[in-house]
Image: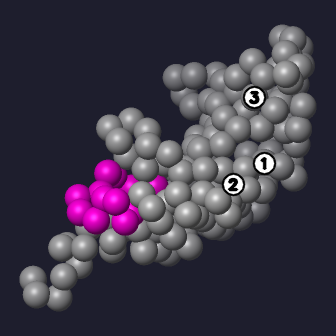
Amino acid sequence: MSDLFDDASRVGLERRIDEWLATVHAQHPNVVAAQRAADESDRWMVRLRGEAKEFTTIWLRLGQRTLRYETYVMPYPEENVVEVFELLLRRNERLVGVHYALGAENAVFLNGELVLGAVEERELDRIIGTLYATVEAQFYDLVRLGFAARFSSSQ
């Protein structure tokens, strides 16, 4: 089991995340927002402009033992549901540190978590990069399969 962080350790970790976010926002042009959530002190948001998907918003949440992270990928597919989920499960096998899952309203998300002792700039960069790159690389194929009728040339 990972270590439980005391209040002082959590405050230091929160400060490091805030500082990292400020740096990321200032140095990366595709980061359009990076900030602590207004309504929750243990939650942060990073919003990136993409090409395949217009925006990818990544949420980080600090727990007692882990930092959880997630991003919304797409709504529940309207068609080819079995094929979409088979594709997601096959892609899960190749992903490191993240996995596809059904979340609120059965929407498709990418989720992961990291023990608090491993939270450092390099890992935060890897997390954001992995989530962003995975969405960008796979979004178009997933949407075209799950919403094929909307892309039909007969319309």
The residue nearer to you, when weighing 95 against 69, is: 95
Question: Quick one: quadrant of the N terminus?
Answer: top right
Name the residue type under label 2: Ile
Q: Position of residue 138 (x, y in %)?
A: 51, 70
Q: Residue furthest top?
A: 7
Where is mark 3, residue-wise? 66
Q: Which image quadrant is residue 8 in?
A: top right
Name the residue type under label 3: Thr
- Residue 120 covered by magenta stretch: no
* Residue 15 appears in view: no
Mark 1, residues whose alpha carbon is within 10 Å: few (<14), some, or many (≥20)?
Answer: some
Residue at 46% from the left image edge and 55% from the top image edge? 73
Mark 2, residues whose alpha carbon is within 10 Å: few (<14), some, or many (≥20)?
Answer: many
- Foreground mark, 3 or 1? 3
Question: Distance of mark 3 from mark 1, alpha carbons?
Answer: 13 Å
141 lies above or below 83: below
Name the residue type under label 1: Leu
The residue nearer to you, when weighing 60 against 92, is: 92
* Disc sitting over residue 3 in the figure: none
Question: Quick one: quadrant of the C terminus?
Answer: bottom left
- Residue range highlighted in magenta: 73-84
* Disc sitting over residue 128 in the figure: 2
